[in-house]
Amino acid sequence: MSQQRDLPESMAWRVIGRLESGQTQRSVADAVGESPEVFVARLWNRFQETGNVRRRPGVGRPRATTSTDDRYIQLTAHRNRTENATQLQRQLLLATGRRVSSQTVRNRLHEGGLYARRPMFCIPLTPRHRAARRRWAAEHRDWEQHDWSQVMSTDESRFSLGAPDVFLYGGTGALEITPHSFVKGHNTEELVGWYGVESA
């Protein structure tokens, strides 16, 4: 669906001048670089109806939400970071009785600078971390059972390499969110690893 847009006012008056001089709408559209003649036809109709090239204020579809509703949606998303647009839509309906689509909720969140992001589920490793891990692995590669038996503790780490099912709403500078709080999703399995051996 194409969005309706207007020519700059100076260009619009030039178009009206050309049309009043007898040029066709197609030739005027070509001359001003507007490929669809619809813009020229719409402008001409507006000029004939109102005597002006400006759009009438209030023309177009009215907003489904009020500014109070918009603030409520954004505040609720800040407070309940893991709720999705459908859940926020339900909360708005319960609080105000106003029924809006989940897309409207997403639009209002975007207007407030809030976007759905996947939370980070791993610590990002720098090249320095990777080098230290490789160095440690190389140093301990030849350890025997006796060497590992000297390790006093065990450790269990759970890695979820798959993307979490939760999205957080956040924007730049919003609460404690940082650009490093999010990562793109991956579809992989979950691994559990145990490290170390209990001493006998």
Image (cartoon, helix red, strand yellow):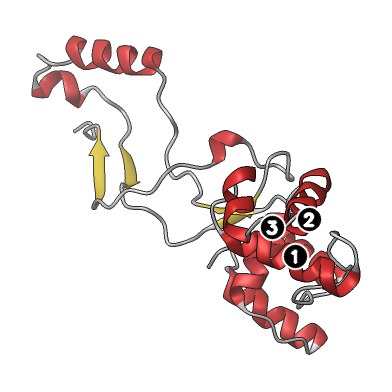
Q: Give the residue drawn at x 78%, y 58%.
A: 20
Where in the figure is residue 99, as x and y percent of width and height? 71, 86
* Labels 2 & 1 near each other (Cβ < 8 A): yes
Q: Residues within 10 Å of mark 3 (few under 14, many from 20)?
A: few
Q: Give the residue drawn at x 62%, y 79%.
A: 101
**Residue behind mark 3:** 5
In the picture shown, does residue 147 fall above or below 159? above
Where in the figure is residue 186, as x and y percent of width and height? 32, 48
Q: Nearer the viewer, mark 3 or mark 1?
A: 1
For marks 3 and 1, the one nearer the N-term is: 3
For marks 2 and 1, the one nearer the N-term is: 2
Distance of label 2 from label 3 (alpha carbons): 17 Å
Q: Residues within 10 Å of mark 1 (few under 14, many from 20)?
A: many
**Outermost residue to the front:** 22
Distance of label 3 from label 1 (alpha carbons): 14 Å
**Residue behind mark 1:** 44
**Residue behind mark 2:** 16
